[in-house]
Image (cartoon, rainbow, N blue to C red):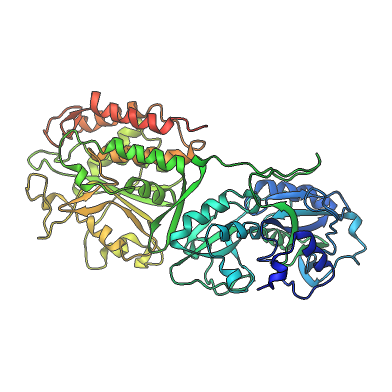
């Protein structure tokens, strides 16, 4: 709602006084108390207070706890002087047995306050002033509307009697200003911090932005991207699901105005029994940057400056071209980074590899591709992703035996499903990629090609010597072409000449796979296995390939080499350098 200039200039204390006096100009608090934190408020019976505190601790993004009152306490000295929570919010909600029974302008008449505990939770209105100062338009304020709030399909971590879906706010942000919006909000964890999602609302289970569950519709302008922040109205959902006999809350959009500045460098001061988090000044290398990883559906991803810098170093390492094959001509800035981010958002990945360059040998395959594919697969599996390997029909038996051998040798913890694709008609790719051929139900959400032949303009497949090897190659590249028209499937691997360029431009395709594995490891070090045995595992797997008669691509040697380069020292050195970059500490 738009406010007059006189209200915009008032301090939080002056505004609280007007609210207490029932000033009709104040309906919501969006756009008010610029430069100060605002708070969601939940009031619960004393016997539920410890459970709710634990719920907040388990879900700090939507429920950043600023202060927990004593039982029956109506003031909040750490947050505001001379405040009375029963009168200093413009509209309250009253709940009985988890049902909203009425909205009121005051709780002063409530006779049960002595057994109630009040929780003050950070609010995203607290960063809107900083957004404006950074030149980021705040569309809800511009349009004179309450913020849009949506119930998502994402569940919060339960605690005690409390469990509920996450609620988010949505602010339209111009695409060119996403980094600025992310940086500003990241620095204010008390106001929910950085966004939880940027892009298509369907990822959160939100079907229609024009129908918010709370607040009002805020319209996107041309060039805007929907950006979603965790929201304290999640606490209201917790009330509805836990069904306490009696509870109160602020009405969404009608916040409690605190005297706490929104400047991250200003620490909060509070008595020892206060529970609010302290402001901490973020280290610049931890500031997130925003990257688009998908156009359809629209999806952006965040990565810290430190992680981005490391992945760019990985990209530099694998960009070396000891075989002098002109790899630099294929280089695309941040291709590795975008591949890692897209894969981190995936849940079901299909990886294809296998280049039958040695058509006069049996088997005709080369040693570049499979080791990198297995390295990626291993890391994806450790992150809980579903992984499927896709191969040519002629090579199924051999590749299954190789996978089984890798399991026996400890390179893989378990066998990876192995499938083939047959071009049986115009809809074959669609039926392969999607359940029942339904484009809205993709079987995979990401496809990866590493060292794989692609179709030339004449419809044939050629090796690097210009020999037609179509009889040895299944048209798996059809899947990548079909995926371009299926929302929800992203790809790593692009067509260049007669080759599907792998996950990123690398002197040897395996190196690209190694770099992707390292890049995926960076944000998940607490959940993924150690990389200390990486060199040994890759040497073991290459030995398995040689055992099955698979040869070096450039020389056709049946030896421990890839593209004419021996594993020691060349490939082992590259892996060691990738590990050094990945595991290098960035702690200031």
Left or right: residue 26 versus residue 165 is: right
Count of numbered circles on the image:
0
Residue situated furthest right in the rendering:
111
In the figure, 419 relative to 286: above or below?
A: below
The percent coordinates of residue 67 (x first, y second) are 76, 49
Taking the spot 36% from the left edge, 29% from the top edge, the residue there is: 534
Taking the spot 73% from the left edge, 67% from the top edge, the residue there is: 251
Residue 392 showing in the rendered view: no
Left or right: residue 424 versus residue 109 is: left
Give the quadrant of the N terminus.
Answer: bottom right
Left or right: residue 474 versus residue 310 is: left
In depth, the one of 149 and 205 nearer the eye is: 149
Taking the spot 57% from the left edge, 53% from the top edge, the residue there is: 185
- The image quarter containing residue 15 is bottom right
Taking the spot 74% from the left edge, 71% from the top edge, the residue there is: 26
The percent coordinates of residue 337 (x first, y second) are 37, 46
In the figure, 244 relative to 538: above or below?
A: below
The percent coordinates of residue 315 (x first, y second) are 32, 40
In the figure, 107 relative to 81: above or below?
A: below
In the figure, 561 relative to 195: above or below?
A: above
In depth, the one of 325 and 247 nearer the eye is: 325
Residue 98 showing in the rendered view: yes
- The image quarter containing residue 268 is top right
The percent coordinates of residue 563 (x first, y second) are 17, 35
In depth, the one of 253 and 449 nearer the eye is: 253
Left or right: residue 189 versus residue 316 is: right
């Amino acid at each position: 709602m738009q406010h007059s200039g006189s209200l915009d200039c008032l301090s939080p204390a002056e505004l609280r006084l007007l609210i207490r006096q029932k000033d009709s100009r104040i309906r919501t608090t969006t756009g008010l108390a610029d430069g100060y934190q605002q708070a969601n408020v939940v009031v619960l019976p004393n016997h539920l207070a410890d459970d709710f505190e634990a719920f907040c601790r388990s879900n700090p993004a939507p429920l950043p706890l600023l202060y927990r009152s004593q039982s029956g306490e109506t003031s909040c000295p750490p947050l505001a002087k001379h405040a009375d929570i029963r009168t200093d919010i413009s509209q309250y909600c009253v709940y009985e047995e988890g049902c909203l029974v009425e909205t009121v302008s005051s709780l002063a008449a409530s006779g049960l306050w002595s057994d109630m505990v009040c929780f003050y939770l950070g609010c995203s209105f607290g960063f809107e002033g900083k957004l404006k100062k950074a030149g980021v338009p705040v569309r809800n304020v511009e349009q004179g509307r309450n913020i849009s709030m949506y119930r998502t399909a994402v569940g919060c971590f339960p605690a005690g009697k409390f469990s509920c879906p996450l609620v988010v706010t949505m602010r339209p942000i111009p695409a060119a200003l996403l980094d600025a919006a992310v940086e500003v909000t990241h620095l204010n964890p008390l106001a929910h911090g950085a966004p939880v999602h940027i892009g298509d609302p369907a990822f959160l289970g939100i079907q229609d932005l024009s129908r918010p569950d709370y607040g009002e519709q805020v319209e996107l302008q041309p060039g805007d991207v929907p950006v979603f922040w965790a929201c304290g109205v999640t606490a209201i959902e917790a009330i509805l699901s836990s069904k306490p006999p009696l509870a109160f809350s602020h009405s969404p959009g009608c916040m409690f105005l605190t005297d706490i500045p929104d400047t991250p460098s200003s620490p909060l001061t509070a008595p020892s029994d206060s529970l609010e988090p302290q402001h901490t000044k973020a280290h610049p290398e931890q500031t997130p940057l925003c990257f688009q990883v998908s156009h359809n559906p629209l999806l952006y991803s965040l990565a810290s400056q430190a992680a981005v810098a490391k992945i760019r170093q990985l990209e530099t390492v694998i960009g070396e071209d000891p075989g002098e094959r002109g790899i630099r001509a294929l280089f695309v800035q941040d291709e590795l980074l975008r591949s890692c981010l897209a894969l981190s958002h995936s849940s079901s990945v299909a990886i294809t590899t296998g280049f039958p360059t040695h058509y006069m040998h049996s088997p005709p395959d080369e040693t570049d591709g499979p080791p990198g594919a297995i390295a990626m697969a291993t890391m994806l599996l450790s992150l809980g992703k579903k992984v499927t390997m896709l191969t040519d029909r002629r090579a199924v038996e051999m590749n299954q035996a190789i996978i089984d051998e890798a399991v026996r040798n400890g390179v893989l913890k378990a066998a990876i499903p192995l499938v083939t694709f047959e071009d049986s008609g115009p809809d074959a790719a669609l039926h392969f990629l999607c359940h029942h051929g339904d484009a809205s139900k993709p079987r995979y959400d990401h496809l990866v090609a590493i060292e794989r032949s692609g179709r030339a303009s004449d419809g044939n497949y050629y090796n690097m010597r210009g020999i037609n090897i179509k009889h040895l190659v299944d048209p798996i590249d059809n899947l990548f072409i079909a995926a371009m028209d299926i929302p929800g499937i992203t790809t790593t691997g692009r067509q260049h000449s007669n080759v599907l360029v792998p996950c990123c431009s690398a002197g040897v395709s395996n190196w690209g796979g190694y770099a992707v594995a390292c890049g995926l490891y960076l944000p998940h070090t607490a959940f993924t296995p150690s990389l200390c045995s990486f060199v040994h595992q890759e040497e073991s797997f290459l030995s398995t390939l040689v055992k099955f008669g698979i040869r070096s691509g450039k020389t056709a040697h049946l030896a421990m080499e890839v593209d004419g380069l021996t594993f020691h020292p060349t490939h082992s050195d590259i892996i060691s350098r990738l590990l050094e970059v990945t595991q290098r500490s960035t702690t200031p």
